[in-house]
Image (spheres, rainbow, N blue to C red):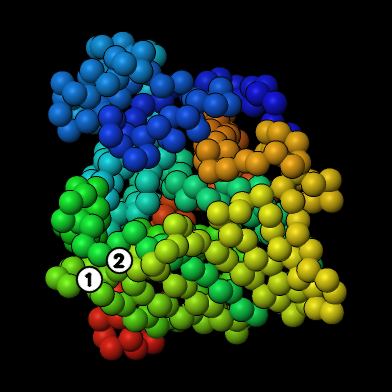
Protein backbone atom coordinates (compact mmCIF):
# COMPACT_ATOMS: atom_id res chain seq x y z
CA UNK A 1 0.00 0.00 0.00
CA UNK A 2 1.17 3.53 -0.81
CA UNK A 3 1.52 5.65 2.32
CA UNK A 4 3.26 8.77 1.02
CA UNK A 5 6.88 7.85 1.78
CA UNK A 6 9.32 9.03 -0.89
CA UNK A 7 10.07 6.46 -3.57
CA UNK A 8 12.58 8.49 -5.60
CA UNK A 9 16.09 9.82 -5.13
CA UNK A 10 14.72 13.35 -5.53
CA UNK A 11 11.55 15.20 -6.42
CA UNK A 12 11.39 15.84 -10.18
CA UNK A 13 11.24 19.49 -11.20
CA UNK A 14 8.24 19.64 -13.49
CA UNK A 15 6.35 22.02 -15.78
CA UNK A 16 3.15 22.05 -17.78
CA UNK A 17 2.29 23.22 -21.27
CA UNK A 18 -1.43 23.96 -21.37
CA UNK A 19 -3.79 22.89 -18.62
CA UNK A 20 -4.67 26.43 -17.59
CA UNK A 21 -7.90 27.96 -16.39
CA UNK A 22 -10.87 26.25 -18.04
CA UNK A 23 -8.90 23.15 -19.05
CA UNK A 24 -10.80 19.88 -18.66
CA UNK A 25 -7.68 17.94 -17.71
CA UNK A 26 -5.23 20.44 -16.21
CA UNK A 27 -6.27 19.86 -12.61
CA UNK A 28 -6.13 16.06 -12.77
CA UNK A 29 -2.59 16.27 -14.19
CA UNK A 30 -1.47 18.52 -11.32
CA UNK A 31 -3.33 16.63 -8.63
CA UNK A 32 -1.97 13.28 -9.78
CA UNK A 33 1.60 14.44 -10.26
CA UNK A 34 1.85 16.16 -6.89
CA UNK A 35 0.03 13.67 -4.69
CA UNK A 36 2.90 11.26 -3.95
CA UNK A 37 5.67 13.87 -3.67
CA UNK A 38 7.28 12.65 -6.89
CA UNK A 39 6.98 15.89 -8.88
CA UNK A 40 7.29 19.57 -7.97
CA UNK A 41 5.53 22.08 -10.23
CA UNK A 42 8.03 24.91 -10.76
CA UNK A 43 7.15 26.42 -14.15
CA UNK A 44 4.53 26.52 -16.86
CA UNK A 45 3.25 27.89 -20.15
CA UNK A 46 -0.38 27.39 -19.25
CA UNK A 47 -2.34 29.34 -21.84
CA UNK A 48 -2.24 30.56 -25.42
CA UNK A 49 -2.90 34.00 -23.90
CA UNK A 50 0.40 34.89 -22.11
CA UNK A 51 -1.13 37.29 -19.58
CA UNK A 52 -3.91 34.89 -18.67
CA UNK A 53 -1.38 32.07 -18.39
CA UNK A 54 0.89 34.09 -16.10
CA UNK A 55 -2.03 35.08 -13.89
CA UNK A 56 -3.06 31.45 -13.62
CA UNK A 57 0.47 30.27 -12.80
CA UNK A 58 0.86 32.88 -10.07
CA UNK A 59 -2.49 31.71 -8.74
CA UNK A 60 -1.00 28.24 -8.42
CA UNK A 61 1.80 29.70 -6.31
CA UNK A 62 4.53 29.78 -8.97
CA UNK A 63 7.21 32.42 -9.37
CA UNK A 64 5.95 35.00 -11.86
CA UNK A 65 9.25 34.80 -13.77
CA UNK A 66 8.68 31.09 -14.41
CA UNK A 67 5.21 31.55 -15.90
CA UNK A 68 6.17 31.72 -19.56
CA UNK A 69 4.30 33.03 -22.64
CA UNK A 70 4.94 29.84 -24.65
CA UNK A 71 6.68 26.48 -24.45
CA UNK A 72 9.64 27.49 -26.63
CA UNK A 73 10.54 30.34 -24.31
CA UNK A 74 10.09 28.09 -21.30
CA UNK A 75 12.40 25.35 -22.61
CA UNK A 76 15.05 27.93 -23.57
CA UNK A 77 14.98 29.86 -20.30
CA UNK A 78 14.70 26.83 -18.02
CA UNK A 79 17.75 25.28 -19.69
CA UNK A 80 19.82 28.23 -18.40
CA UNK A 81 18.90 27.56 -14.76
CA UNK A 82 20.74 25.23 -12.40
CA UNK A 83 17.32 24.34 -10.98
CA UNK A 84 15.60 24.15 -14.37
CA UNK A 85 12.80 21.75 -15.21
CA UNK A 86 13.53 18.05 -15.76
CA UNK A 87 10.12 16.98 -17.10
CA UNK A 88 7.08 18.50 -18.76
CA UNK A 89 3.45 17.49 -19.24
CA UNK A 90 1.64 18.39 -22.45
CA UNK A 91 -2.06 19.14 -21.92
CA UNK A 92 -2.91 20.99 -25.12
CA UNK A 93 -5.19 20.21 -28.11
CA UNK A 94 -4.18 17.18 -30.17
CA UNK A 95 -2.77 19.09 -33.13
CA UNK A 96 0.03 20.58 -31.02
CA UNK A 97 1.28 17.40 -29.33
CA UNK A 98 3.89 16.41 -31.89
CA UNK A 99 5.75 19.72 -32.11
CA UNK A 100 5.75 20.27 -28.33
CA UNK A 101 6.81 16.70 -27.55
CA UNK A 102 9.57 16.87 -30.15
CA UNK A 103 10.85 20.18 -28.77
CA UNK A 104 10.81 18.79 -25.22
CA UNK A 105 12.77 15.69 -26.18
CA UNK A 106 15.28 17.81 -28.09
CA UNK A 107 15.64 19.87 -24.90
CA UNK A 108 16.51 16.59 -23.08
CA UNK A 109 13.33 16.67 -21.00
CA UNK A 110 11.20 13.74 -19.89
CA UNK A 111 7.65 14.03 -21.23
CA UNK A 112 4.13 13.13 -20.16
CA UNK A 113 1.85 13.61 -23.16
CA UNK A 114 -1.88 13.49 -23.65
CA UNK A 115 -3.00 11.06 -26.30
CA UNK A 116 -2.83 10.96 -29.21
CA UNK A 117 0.91 11.47 -29.08
CA UNK A 118 0.71 12.77 -32.66
CA UNK A 119 -1.27 12.28 -35.87
CA UNK A 120 0.74 9.75 -37.90
CA UNK A 121 3.09 6.81 -37.48
CA UNK A 122 5.73 8.84 -39.33
CA UNK A 123 5.58 11.47 -36.58
CA UNK A 124 5.37 8.78 -33.88
CA UNK A 125 8.53 7.15 -35.22
CA UNK A 126 10.37 10.48 -34.95
CA UNK A 127 9.35 10.85 -31.29
CA UNK A 128 10.21 7.25 -30.50
CA UNK A 129 13.66 7.65 -32.07
CA UNK A 130 14.28 10.91 -30.16
CA UNK A 131 13.16 9.31 -26.89
CA UNK A 132 15.60 6.44 -27.36
CA UNK A 133 18.45 8.64 -28.63
CA UNK A 134 18.25 11.06 -25.70
CA UNK A 135 17.30 8.35 -23.19
CA UNK A 136 14.20 10.22 -22.11
CA UNK A 137 10.90 8.81 -20.84
CA UNK A 138 7.69 9.54 -22.75
CA UNK A 139 4.56 8.64 -20.78
CA UNK A 140 1.10 8.65 -22.37
CA UNK A 141 -1.90 9.42 -20.16
CA UNK A 142 -4.09 6.41 -20.73
CA UNK A 143 -5.35 7.22 -17.25
CA UNK A 144 -7.71 4.29 -16.79
CA UNK A 145 -4.79 1.86 -16.99
CA UNK A 146 -3.73 3.06 -13.54
CA UNK A 147 -6.64 1.32 -11.82
CA UNK A 148 -5.32 -1.46 -9.62
CA UNK A 149 -7.75 -4.06 -10.97
CA UNK A 150 -6.23 -3.65 -14.43
CA UNK A 151 -3.00 -4.89 -12.84
CA UNK A 152 -4.99 -7.74 -11.26
CA UNK A 153 -6.38 -8.70 -14.67
CA UNK A 154 -2.87 -8.54 -16.17
CA UNK A 155 -1.53 -10.81 -13.42
CA UNK A 156 -4.38 -13.29 -13.82
CA UNK A 157 -3.80 -13.55 -17.57
CA UNK A 158 -0.05 -13.99 -17.05
CA UNK A 159 -0.70 -16.67 -14.41
CA UNK A 160 -2.93 -18.63 -16.79
CA UNK A 161 -6.09 -18.19 -14.69
CA UNK A 162 -8.14 -17.58 -17.84
CA UNK A 163 -6.40 -20.20 -19.98
CA UNK A 164 -5.74 -19.36 -23.62
CA UNK A 165 -7.09 -15.92 -24.54
CA UNK A 166 -9.63 -16.25 -27.35
CA UNK A 167 -11.85 -13.15 -27.50
CA UNK A 168 -11.58 -9.55 -26.29
CA UNK A 169 -14.70 -7.39 -26.34
CA UNK A 170 -14.07 -3.65 -25.87
CA UNK A 171 -16.13 -0.49 -25.91
CA UNK A 172 -15.90 3.15 -25.01
CA UNK A 173 -19.34 4.37 -26.01
CA UNK A 174 -20.99 7.42 -24.46
CA UNK A 175 -23.81 9.63 -25.69
CA UNK A 176 -22.86 13.27 -25.25
CA UNK A 177 -22.35 13.95 -28.97
CA UNK A 178 -25.65 12.43 -30.17
CA UNK A 179 -26.67 15.93 -31.26
CA UNK A 180 -24.56 18.79 -32.75
CA UNK A 181 -23.00 19.81 -29.43
CA UNK A 182 -20.07 21.40 -31.26
CA UNK A 183 -22.26 24.33 -32.33
CA UNK A 184 -22.35 25.57 -28.73
CA UNK A 185 -19.33 23.95 -27.05
CA UNK A 186 -15.84 25.15 -28.09
CA UNK A 187 -14.17 22.12 -26.46
CA UNK A 188 -16.33 19.83 -28.57
CA UNK A 189 -15.77 21.86 -31.73
CA UNK A 190 -12.01 21.32 -31.97
CA UNK A 191 -12.39 17.58 -31.30
CA UNK A 192 -14.39 17.26 -34.51
CA UNK A 193 -12.07 19.38 -36.65
CA UNK A 194 -9.39 17.27 -38.41
CA UNK A 195 -7.01 20.24 -38.37
CA UNK A 196 -6.93 20.08 -34.56
CA UNK A 197 -8.07 16.53 -33.71
CA UNK A 198 -6.34 14.57 -36.45
CA UNK A 199 -7.81 11.88 -38.74
CA UNK A 200 -10.31 10.53 -36.21
CA UNK A 201 -12.66 11.60 -33.45
CA UNK A 202 -14.35 8.61 -31.78
CA UNK A 203 -11.54 6.10 -32.35
CA UNK A 204 -8.73 8.49 -31.48
CA UNK A 205 -10.46 10.21 -28.58
CA UNK A 206 -12.01 7.22 -26.79
CA UNK A 207 -11.37 3.97 -28.69
CA UNK A 208 -7.66 3.97 -27.94
CA UNK A 209 -8.37 3.83 -24.18
CA UNK A 210 -9.82 0.28 -24.06
CA UNK A 211 -7.34 -0.69 -26.78
CA UNK A 212 -4.47 0.16 -24.41
CA UNK A 213 -6.21 -1.68 -21.56
CA UNK A 214 -6.20 -4.79 -23.75
CA UNK A 215 -2.49 -4.27 -24.48
CA UNK A 216 -1.73 -3.85 -20.78
CA UNK A 217 -3.75 -6.90 -19.72
CA UNK A 218 -2.68 -9.14 -22.60
CA UNK A 219 0.78 -7.87 -23.64
CA UNK A 220 1.61 -11.05 -25.57
CA UNK A 221 -1.19 -10.51 -28.11
CA UNK A 222 -0.13 -8.86 -31.37
CA UNK A 223 -2.61 -7.56 -33.95
CA UNK A 224 -2.35 -9.33 -37.31
CA UNK A 225 -5.02 -7.47 -39.26
CA UNK A 226 -8.16 -5.39 -38.75
CA UNK A 227 -11.22 -4.04 -40.48
CA UNK A 228 -13.19 -0.96 -39.54
CA UNK A 229 -16.47 0.75 -40.31
CA UNK A 230 -16.98 4.34 -39.20
CA UNK A 231 -19.91 6.73 -39.43
CA UNK A 232 -20.82 10.36 -38.89
CA UNK A 233 -24.43 10.16 -37.75
CA UNK A 234 -24.74 13.89 -37.06
CA UNK A 235 -24.99 15.74 -40.35
CA UNK A 236 -21.98 17.69 -41.68
CA UNK A 237 -19.40 16.29 -39.25
CA UNK A 238 -16.02 15.80 -40.89
CA UNK A 239 -14.92 13.07 -38.47
CA UNK A 240 -16.67 9.92 -37.29
CA UNK A 241 -18.82 9.90 -34.17
CA UNK A 242 -19.16 6.10 -34.21
CA UNK A 243 -16.95 3.21 -35.32
CA UNK A 244 -16.76 -0.57 -35.09
CA UNK A 245 -13.35 -2.26 -35.44
CA UNK A 246 -12.76 -6.01 -35.71
CA UNK A 247 -9.26 -7.36 -35.12
CA UNK A 248 -7.48 -10.67 -35.54
CA UNK A 249 -4.36 -11.48 -33.51
CA UNK A 250 -1.35 -13.50 -34.58
CA UNK A 251 -2.25 -16.37 -32.21
CA UNK A 252 -5.78 -16.70 -33.66
CA UNK A 253 -7.62 -14.69 -31.00
CA UNK A 254 -10.12 -12.05 -32.11
CA UNK A 255 -11.35 -8.73 -30.73
CA UNK A 256 -13.77 -5.91 -31.40
CA UNK A 257 -13.81 -2.27 -30.34
CA UNK A 258 -16.92 -0.08 -30.32
CA UNK A 259 -15.81 3.57 -30.27
CA UNK A 260 -18.76 5.92 -30.03
CA UNK A 261 -20.10 9.27 -28.88
CA UNK A 262 -23.62 8.28 -29.98
CA UNK A 263 -24.61 5.84 -27.22
CA UNK A 264 -27.62 7.82 -25.98
CA UNK A 265 -28.09 7.69 -22.23
CA UNK A 266 -24.60 6.37 -21.52
CA UNK A 267 -22.53 8.69 -19.35
CA UNK A 268 -19.21 7.00 -20.10
CA UNK A 269 -19.55 3.38 -21.18
CA UNK A 270 -16.00 2.04 -21.19
CA UNK A 271 -15.87 -1.72 -20.67
CA UNK A 272 -13.48 -4.54 -21.48
CA UNK A 273 -14.17 -8.28 -21.38
CA UNK A 274 -11.34 -10.82 -21.71
CA UNK A 275 -12.50 -14.33 -22.61
CA UNK A 276 -10.20 -17.32 -22.22
CA UNK A 277 -10.53 -21.08 -22.57
CA UNK A 278 -11.17 -21.49 -18.82
CA UNK A 279 -12.65 -18.22 -17.57
CA UNK A 280 -13.52 -14.60 -18.37
CA UNK A 281 -12.85 -11.19 -16.81
CA UNK A 282 -14.87 -8.00 -17.21
CA UNK A 283 -14.11 -4.47 -15.99
CA UNK A 284 -16.24 -1.32 -16.30
CA UNK A 285 -14.64 2.03 -15.58
CA UNK A 286 -17.81 3.39 -13.95
CA UNK A 287 -17.43 0.66 -11.32
CA UNK A 288 -13.62 0.53 -11.18
CA UNK A 289 -13.34 -1.15 -7.78
CA UNK A 290 -14.90 -4.40 -9.02
CA UNK A 291 -13.54 -6.96 -11.47
CA UNK A 292 -15.95 -9.69 -12.57
CA UNK A 293 -14.36 -13.15 -12.70
CA UNK A 294 -16.39 -15.92 -14.30
CA UNK A 295 -15.03 -19.46 -14.28
CA UNK A 296 -16.85 -21.96 -16.49
CA UNK A 297 -19.19 -24.08 -14.35
CA UNK A 298 -18.79 -21.98 -11.18
CA UNK A 299 -20.67 -19.01 -9.62
CA UNK A 300 -19.69 -15.53 -10.72
CA UNK A 301 -17.08 -13.89 -8.48
CA UNK A 302 -16.72 -10.15 -7.89
CA UNK A 303 -13.11 -9.27 -7.04
CA UNK A 304 -12.87 -6.09 -4.97
CA UNK A 305 -10.02 -3.58 -5.10
CA UNK A 306 -7.79 -4.01 -2.08
CA UNK A 307 -8.96 -7.55 -1.30
CA UNK A 308 -6.37 -9.75 0.39
CA UNK A 309 -7.04 -12.48 -2.19
CA UNK A 310 -5.71 -10.33 -5.07
CA UNK A 311 -2.21 -10.73 -6.44
CA UNK A 312 0.35 -8.72 -4.51
CA UNK A 313 1.19 -6.47 -7.45
CA UNK A 314 -2.51 -5.48 -7.65
CA UNK A 315 -2.46 -4.29 -4.01
CA UNK A 316 0.78 -2.29 -4.10
CA UNK A 317 -0.82 0.93 -5.38
CA UNK A 318 -3.79 1.03 -2.98
CA UNK A 319 -4.02 4.19 -0.91
CA UNK A 320 -6.83 3.05 1.36
CA UNK A 321 -8.12 -0.31 2.55
CA UNK A 322 -10.65 -2.53 0.80
CA UNK A 323 -14.24 -1.28 0.71
CA UNK A 324 -13.53 2.43 0.40
CA UNK A 325 -14.06 3.64 -3.19
CA UNK A 326 -11.13 4.89 -5.22
CA UNK A 327 -11.44 6.49 -8.63
CA UNK A 328 -9.86 8.13 -11.65
CA UNK A 329 -7.66 10.53 -9.65
CA UNK A 330 -6.02 7.53 -7.95
CA UNK A 331 -5.56 5.81 -11.31
CA UNK A 332 -3.87 8.89 -12.78
CA UNK A 333 -1.75 9.22 -9.66
CA UNK A 334 -0.60 5.64 -10.05
CA UNK A 335 0.45 6.38 -13.62
CA UNK A 336 2.28 9.56 -12.64
CA UNK A 337 4.07 7.58 -9.93
CA UNK A 338 5.15 5.04 -12.54
CA UNK A 339 6.24 7.82 -14.90
CA UNK A 340 8.31 9.34 -12.08
CA UNK A 341 9.87 6.01 -11.16
CA UNK A 342 10.82 5.43 -14.80
CA UNK A 343 12.37 8.91 -15.06
CA UNK A 344 14.24 8.39 -11.79
CA UNK A 345 15.64 5.04 -12.92
CA UNK A 346 16.82 6.51 -16.21
CA UNK A 347 18.42 9.51 -14.49
CA UNK A 348 20.13 7.16 -12.02
CA UNK A 349 21.65 5.15 -14.85
CA UNK A 350 19.44 2.11 -14.28
CA UNK A 351 17.48 0.04 -16.77
CA UNK A 352 13.71 -0.30 -16.79
CA UNK A 353 12.83 -3.99 -16.67
CA UNK A 354 9.64 -4.22 -18.70
CA UNK A 355 8.73 -7.65 -17.34
CA UNK A 356 7.99 -6.24 -13.89
CA UNK A 357 7.55 -2.52 -14.50
CA UNK A 358 5.15 -1.21 -17.11
CA UNK A 359 3.46 2.07 -18.01
CA UNK A 360 1.99 3.57 -21.20
CA UNK A 361 5.23 4.63 -22.86
CA UNK A 362 6.30 6.00 -26.23
CA UNK A 363 5.67 2.59 -27.82
CA UNK A 364 2.11 2.67 -26.47
CA UNK A 365 1.73 6.13 -27.99
CA UNK A 366 3.07 4.81 -31.29
CA UNK A 367 0.68 1.84 -31.29
CA UNK A 368 -2.32 4.05 -30.52
CA UNK A 369 -1.51 6.28 -33.48
CA UNK A 370 -0.90 3.25 -35.70
CA UNK A 371 -4.22 1.66 -34.72
CA UNK A 372 -6.18 4.80 -35.60
CA UNK A 373 -4.26 5.13 -38.87
CA UNK A 374 -5.06 1.53 -39.85
CA UNK A 375 -8.72 1.88 -38.82
CA UNK A 376 -9.09 4.97 -40.97
CA UNK A 377 -7.37 3.18 -43.87
CA UNK A 378 -9.80 0.28 -43.61
CA UNK A 379 -12.93 2.41 -43.11
CA UNK A 380 -12.08 4.67 -46.03
CA UNK A 381 -11.62 1.64 -48.33
CA UNK A 382 -15.05 0.03 -47.94
CA UNK A 383 -14.10 -1.56 -44.61
CA UNK A 384 -11.58 -3.92 -46.16
CA UNK A 385 -9.18 -5.97 -44.07
CA UNK A 386 -5.86 -4.18 -43.53
CA UNK A 387 -2.64 -5.91 -42.57
CA UNK A 388 -1.29 -4.51 -39.32
Please tell me how many numbered marks the rendered image carries: 2
Residue 178, numbered label: 2
Residue 203 shows in the view? no
- Residue closer to the observer: 190 or 75: 190
Residue 72: which numbered mark, if any? none
SS class, disc 2? loop
- Percent across and percent down for residue 8 are 60, 25
Point out residue 188 in the picture as x, y percentages from the top left corner: 24, 53
Question: Which of 221 and 312 lies nearest the eye of the viewer?
Answer: 312
Q: Secondary structure at mark 1?
A: loop
Query: Which quarter shows the C terminus?
Result: bottom left
Q: Residue at x 71, y 72 (%)?
A: 280
User: Residue 326: which quarter of the image?
Assistant: top right
State the residue lying farthest toward the front: 265
Q: Earlier in the sequence, mark 2 or mark 1?
A: 2
- The answer to which quarter of the image holds residue 88 is top left
Can the viewer see residue 22?
yes
Residue 255 rendering spot, x and y as whole percentages: 53, 77
Q: Which residue is mark 1?
A: 234
Query: Percent from the top left, x then y, of residue 268?
Result: 46, 57
Q: Residue at x 50, y 77 (%)?
A: 256
- Give the answer, above or below, for where 333 lies relative to 180: above
Question: For mark 2, does the 10 Å Cα neighbourhood hold few (<14), some (14 to 19), or many (20 or more) residues?
Answer: some
Residue appearing at x 56%, y 81% in the figure: 254
Q: Residue at x 61, y 78 (%)?
A: 167
Q: Is mark 2 in CB contact (under 8 Å) with mark 1?
A: yes
Which quadrant of the rendered structure holds the N terminus?
A: top right
Vertical relation: 41 (above or below) 268? above
Nearest the eye: 271 or 142: 271
Amino acid sequence: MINGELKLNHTIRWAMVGGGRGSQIGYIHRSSALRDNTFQLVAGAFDIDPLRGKEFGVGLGLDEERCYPDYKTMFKEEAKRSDGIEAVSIATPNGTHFEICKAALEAKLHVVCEKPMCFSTKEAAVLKELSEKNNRVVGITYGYAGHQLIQQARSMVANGDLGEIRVINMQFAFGSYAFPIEQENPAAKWRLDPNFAGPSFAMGDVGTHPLFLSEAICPELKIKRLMCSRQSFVKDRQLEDNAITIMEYENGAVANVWSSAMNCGSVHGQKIRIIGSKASLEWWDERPNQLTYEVEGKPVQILERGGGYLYEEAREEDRISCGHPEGLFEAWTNLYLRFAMAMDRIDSGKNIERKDFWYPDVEAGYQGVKWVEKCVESADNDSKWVEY
